[in-house]
Amino acid sequence: MVTITESAQAYLAELLEKQEDALGVRVFINQPGTPRAETCIAYCREGDIQDDDQEHKYEAFTAWFDGRSLPFLEDALVDYAKDRMGGQLTIKAPNAKLPRVGEDSPLEDRINYVLYNEVNPALAAHGGEVSLVEITDDKVAILKFGGGCQGCGMVDQTLKGGVEKTLLEQLPQLTGVRDTTDHSDRSNAYI
């Protein structure tokens, strides 16, 4: 579970006092289990709480921890250190970037795992990368290429022969893969 130090609790409580509509804070990780994982603390307002959130009451406020992020928040520490400039809130989540996927993991996590551990290392040889934008209701993975892949003349072959093939083989619940990248910008394209 997440440890929020006393100094961080006092600082968060002070911030929350200045918010009229905040119920507390919500802690979550964007893109958990990937190299781009980012641990976040945000004001939690009406409508922000999700069904799988875990609620924890502190002395001066309530925190909700995103259910999907919980495995990645293990051993996380939120601290506040005063300094001559005021102070700084820090969040250390050593497990945020570790891939933790299994058959019961959300489809988004499993797609990101394949992209970051199998597909992107191959694309990196050409300075490229691909990331998941969203999953449609009909289970199509919408991807965005970047780096050397953006504007590359071979991107269609890379998508169909490499990325799509890999994702559909490993994640049969997907019905397709689409690219939303604007390939008209060829300034960084691998040629």
Image (tube, rainbow, N blue to C red):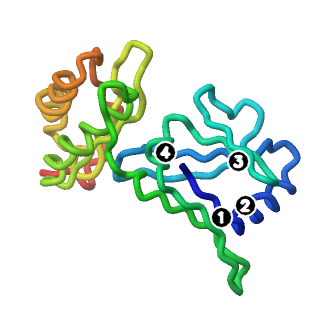
Residue 85 lies left or right of residue 20; in this view the side is: left
Query: Which one is closest to the eye, mark 2 or mark 4?
Result: 2
Tell me the distance, in whole angstroms, between the alpha carbons under discs 4 and 3: 16 Å
* Foreground of the two, 119 or 54: 54
Q: Are marks 4 and 3 in contact (CB under 8 Å)?
A: no
- Label 1's element? loop
Residue drawn where x is 77% and y is 33% of the image: 46
Query: Which one is closest to the eye, mark 4 or mark 3?
Result: 3
Residue 159 lies left or right of residue 31; in this view the side is: left
Chain-order first, disc 2 or disc 4: 2
Chain-order first, disc 1 or disc 4: 1
Q: Which mark is residue 25?
A: 3
Q: Which residue is mark 2?
A: 9
What amino acid is at disc 1? Thr
Query: Which one is closest to the eye, mark 1 or mark 4?
Result: 1
Q: Which residue is mark 1?
A: 5
Q: Which residue is mark 4?
A: 30
Q: Are marks 2 and 1 in contact (CB under 8 Å)?
A: yes
